[in-house]
Image: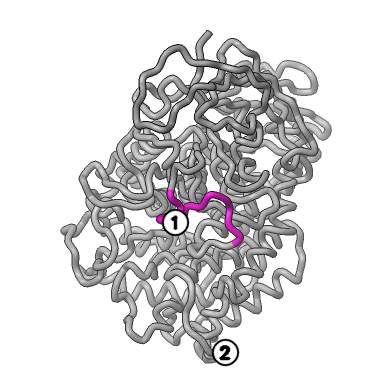
Amino acid sequence: MKNWMMIICGLVIVHTSTAQEKAIIDNSKSPYVKHKSINLGDCKWTEGFWADKFKIAEQSMVPYMGELLTGDTGHALNNFKIAAGLKEGVHKGMRWHDGDFYKYMEAAMYVYSQNGDKKILEEIDGYIDIIGQAQEEDGYLQTQIQLNPKVDRFENRKYHEMYNSGHLLTSACIHYRISGQRNFLDIAVKHADQMYSVFMPESKYYGRFGFNQTQIMGLVELYRTTGDKKYLKLAEKFINNRGKYSVEDTPPTKGYPIGDMVQERTPLRKSNEAVGHAVLALYYYAGAADVYAETGEQALIDALDRLWFNVTEQKMYVTGALGQTHYGASTNRDKIEEGFIDKYMMPNLTAYNETCANVCNSMFSFRMLGLHGESKYADIMELVLFNSALSGINLEGDKYYYANPLRTIDGARDYAKMNTEFPERQPYLECFCCPPNLVRTIAKMSGWAYSLTEKGIAVNLYGGNKLDTKLLDGSTLKLKQETMYPWEGAVAITVESAKKAPFEMLLRIPDWATGTKVLVNGKDAGVEVVAGQFAKIERKWAKGDVVTIDMPMNVSLVEGNPKIEEVRNQVAVKRGPVVYCIESPDLPKDASIVDVYLPSSKPLVAEYKADFLGGVTTIQGDLLIRKDTNDDKMYHTVSKPEWTTYKTQFIPYYSWSNRGSNTEMSVFVPVVWE
């Protein structure tokens, strides 16, 4: 890239430093956000569940992913090198592979924000140099187009140029906030300016282009980082364009499903149902939430409220997973893939539940938490994080699932006919969008643990950590959180430093935690404690004050809405935020998952096993194993079943498929009510 172009980029005005400029979402100046983000690095995991997961991310997940994407297996960095003229070769990988690499870079920067390892920054800066050389003079940067002489820029939306752009902008903003360096940000600014020149003018040709809408979130973050409102205007335009034009095949849409698949049949402000590709939809909703945070447009938030309800109350699995099917049709009869179908239509064996969709569910809810300040959004974040997100990666951090069904039965599916589903986790997925999405989420999660409120601090997620932050009034607050959550329900939060004036501490009481007690210095806090709400303690705090939260960790049987035919007379086992499953290694050798029934009268007991599956609490109990199951025919007559009792255990859903290959598993099991 020419030096004089870099100089021009350097003239872009960037926001003056604020207390929040290093936040994951820099909403410090967003006028319609009630709960603001803390700075990256202000909260660090110290012990327990999330500290262990971050350590795996730091030592295994991110380094392993880097080896894949910078080597010949993943080929992502090679694509940039070839586009920069530094290497001979052709583009390899999916059309959205640039975006996968940007997500990996983002994950690495989150790790750097925690450990300060300069080698990480140096490595990332080396990649940025290559990316800068690959970028064209006017700012365009899409290796799958640049290396394909048969395709022009923005010729067809199936090339996912907007998706790659969104992850570029987001990753560059994060890099700038953490490092203070402009090298990646300058590339992003040039790229966004080129996008603006193409997509801001009114154009029927480009009006339906931005369907995979990560660019909305990226543009809003770039606006927040630079202060240039044109990026916010462009983000808003991409929202306004959806549902504006006739749904018909045109040259830019050929080769990819149209209509509900890409959320273009109904304008967002009139939408009340989540349709189409689940990841596209949730990126879209998250981006719209970011736009609302800046504009406060009532029609936007009204639509997002309706959509959030439809997603979480009518189309979400008990694990927080989303996207019921690989192939199907919307309620408007549009062809869809990897997405939403009718409400309450929730297959278990064929559930798709793409890891990206599950992660995006938590991203959407995190933004809604900021906008509304209600704990129900953090409940969904937590549900996803402990269950359907972590199930996408093995315990060692180097094998992945793309799809996350709730039941697997040996021989029930022909995996040879599938392109993203596998009987066991894979060391590399050709479609590599999910692994970096999940890993960057695990790496940045400490930034979700707390939020800044107008009057103090909100505790969103529980886990051993230390917080050293500044409240919105500029005063310093230091907290220490100690807990074995989610295996135990006791949490102790110690004030290590605080201002003398009173301020509030909001404590999320999970929706399952009925009967929670909150104490301050060993005495009842004297505040209302309601499951599914924040408990508010407002007082003068002093160094050494200890807030204790005691959440009952009862084993529960969870049944689905009676409209969900697939789980009628079945239950899932849940304890705290963790959903459990039964897996074939814990059954008799001749038994299948389909032979398993749960006797309702038998007790289920929690037992922590420090040396099992990385340290988990299992649920011990008896099962009924049916001995007369007949799967030779489609239907057969039945008399009184024959049972044997078998003592076994349920394991956390996220930990399944870590004990050998081709295991069977089920979250929901039939129940025998006694």
Q: Identity of the amino acid at label 1?
A: Ala
**Can residue 418 be spotted in the picture?**
yes
Q: Which residue is mark 1?
A: 416
Does 160 sit left or right of 592 as displayed? left
Question: Spatial distance from mark 1 to mark 2, Cα to Cα?
Answer: 38 Å
Q: Position of residue 331 (x, y in %)?
A: 24, 41
Q: Magenta residues: mostly which secondary structure?
A: loop
**Above or below — where is 125 with respect to 163?**
below
Identify the disc placed on residue 86: 2
Q: Identity of the amino acid at label 2?
A: Leu
Task: Tell me what residue is drawn at x 36 percent, y 19 percent.
Answer: 637
Would you say residue 424 sits in the magenta stretch?
yes
- Say few, some or many: other residues with alpha carbon within 10 Å of mark 2 (under 14 / 14 to 19 / 20 or more): some
**Can residue 33 be spotted in the picture?**
no
Does 168 sit left or right of 252 as displayed? right
Q: Position of residue 400 (x, y in %)?
A: 58, 54
- Say few, some or many: other residues with alpha carbon within 10 Å of mark 1 (under 14 / 14 to 19 / 20 or more): few
Quick one: 20 or 163, which is closer to the camera? 163
Of circles 1 and 2, which is in front? 1
Q: Secondary structure beneath disc 2?
A: loop
Numbered circles on residues, count: 2
